[in-house]
Image: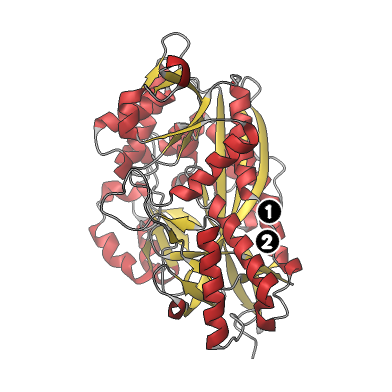
Amino acid sequence: MASSSPLPQWPPEVSDQQRKALAVLATTYALAHGLIYLPPAQVQPPAPTSAIHAPLALFPSPFPRQQFELAKRLQSEYNVLYARVAMDEEFLDRVMGEEGVGRVDEFTGQLWRIWRSLRDQGIHQSRHLGLFRSDYLLHTTETNGEATVSLKQVEFNTISSSFGALSQNVAKMHRYLAATTEYFNSSPFLKAENLPPNETIAGLAEGLVAAHRAYGSSSAWILFVVQPGERNVFDQRWLEYELIEKHSIHVIRQTFDELAISAQVVPNSRILQVKLPGLLPGGVETVEISTVYFRAGYTPNDYPTPRHYATRQVIESSVAIKCPSIQLQLAGGKKVQQVLTQPGVMERFLHDASPHLRSTWMDMWALKEPGVEGSEGVSRARREARNLVLKPQREGGGNNVYKEDIPSFLDTLPEEEREAWIAMTLIKTPEGLGNYLVRAGSGTEGAMKAEVVSELGIFGWALFGGPEKSIEEKEVGWLLRTKGKDSNEGGVAAGFSVLDSLVLVD
């Protein structure tokens, strides 16, 4: 009988004493090297007084070398694909506007209406920056008793693609454990040559630098739009440190509430300025913004009042380069992902795409297509519920509906909202893989062994637009998140996953 997985059994066997020693080394390294979070608090203090290590995996997780290299190669094609989607106004209007999802999904509709309002005023983005992450799971297929794995895309992220910095630090942590303990010779795979380097911090910063230089003012600053009380602040700060230390580019962090007061757009020039009275030398009170990096704005919770949407519109009306612009944020919608799988649609944007690109997609369909009578999509979702996930137009984790929960959810989903949801065939992940998951406050006894699933993210950036609609892009690093097998959701910040890194196997 064939093994249920072509990957090695994992994690390697270690004694309790060795596991505790690894946990001490891992958590100490994490705290010493910025692999950290702010602790939970009802209200985060303005100046942090303590930190905890990020949730992490004790061992790196096995991943087929061939599939890892394929994911890296495909990133450039994905960068170009989504850049071109974002520049196709007719396509986005039809799919995400009031002809499509924006008609039935209020959050998507609000964003699209801001974009349409700006276009009606003759305001268009000259250039766009995307810091992207394409997320994958391994999919297991068994043929004639032999199990093989292939790469399948979970989603493509165009806004607030997080954990680039911490993913680099956790990879370095695993390399440190291998160098200092050799993982007690517990596995022949745990060698330096099988632990791929990860330089995501420099890579993502390179994208921000490219946008800053394209803007053309060396004295301008980069604005990070952040959520209030952000616990994952250090993942963002590492990019800020890289920008000032390596490129002499200043960063300012502000929430939408702060920007409602501090942000202004200069008439005629449309320069975005942020007021910082008392915080700048020489009596200067404002700074010019070259690039706006949104680490907030991807969820309705970031816009609790009309004033918050108005602040987003003020920013979008400026000549600062947005990461992402509203239209690029809309391009990352789940509905776009589903429409791209339809015959000929992806080829509209990529005429010479690799055949491997389409091979990474699972079967997807809409619960209801705009203007189409009947509910075949819903009927099919009911029939195939045990092998499906339903996805709305949301980011950030915790929004999907899985398997046996689908029929009862469909019973309560208003018919007019069905167009905002897509159905996707579940990826069948390899069995028999485990790891030790370490969360803050659990001590050396807290490295809990669990059967796990690991999700690979590949980072890339694209700077695009201008009269020629040119695209400059690059693949710049990776992330691995690992969660317990029984958990459907996968967000680290949402508490489902831990940060992990790769050990490549052939």
Residue 196 picture quarter: bottom right
Q: Amino acid at mark 2?
A: Phe
Image quadrant holding the C terminus, namely bottom right
Q: Which residue is mark 1?
A: 72
**Relative to 454, residue 124 above or below:** above
* Residues under numbered marks 1 and 2 in contact, where contact means CB atoms less than 8 Å apart: yes
Q: Considering only vertical position in the picture, is 399 above or below 500? A: above
- Density class for disc 2 (Cα within 10 Å; few <14, some 14-19, many ≥20) is many
Q: Give the percent coordinates (x, y) of residue 77.
A: 67, 45
- Colour scheme employed for the rendering of this structure: secondary structure
Amino acid carrying label 1: it is: Lys
Q: Nearer the viewer, residue 353 or 9?
A: 9
In the image, 201 versus 39, the foreground residue is: 39
x, y percentage for residue 403?
Answer: 38, 69
The foreground one among 443 and 192 is 443
Judge from the rendering whether residue 309 lies leftward or rightward of residue 61; answer left or right: left
Q: How many marks?
A: 2
Q: Residue furthest top?
A: 268
From the viewer's perspective, is 39 left or right of 415? right
Q: CA distance from mark 1 to mark 2?
A: 6 Å
Q: Quadrant of the N terminus?
A: bottom right
Identify the residue under disc 2.
Answer: 68
Task: Measuring from the top left, give residue 349's x and y in whole percent.
Answer: 62, 38
Crowd band around label 1 with a 10 angstrom C-alpha radius: few (<14), some (14–19), many (20+):
some
| Residue at screen point 62% across, 78% down | 142
Kind of element beneath mark 1: helix
Counting from the top left corner in percent of width and height, residue 63 is at 65, 69
| Element marked by disc 2 | helix
Q: Which mark is residue 471?
A: none
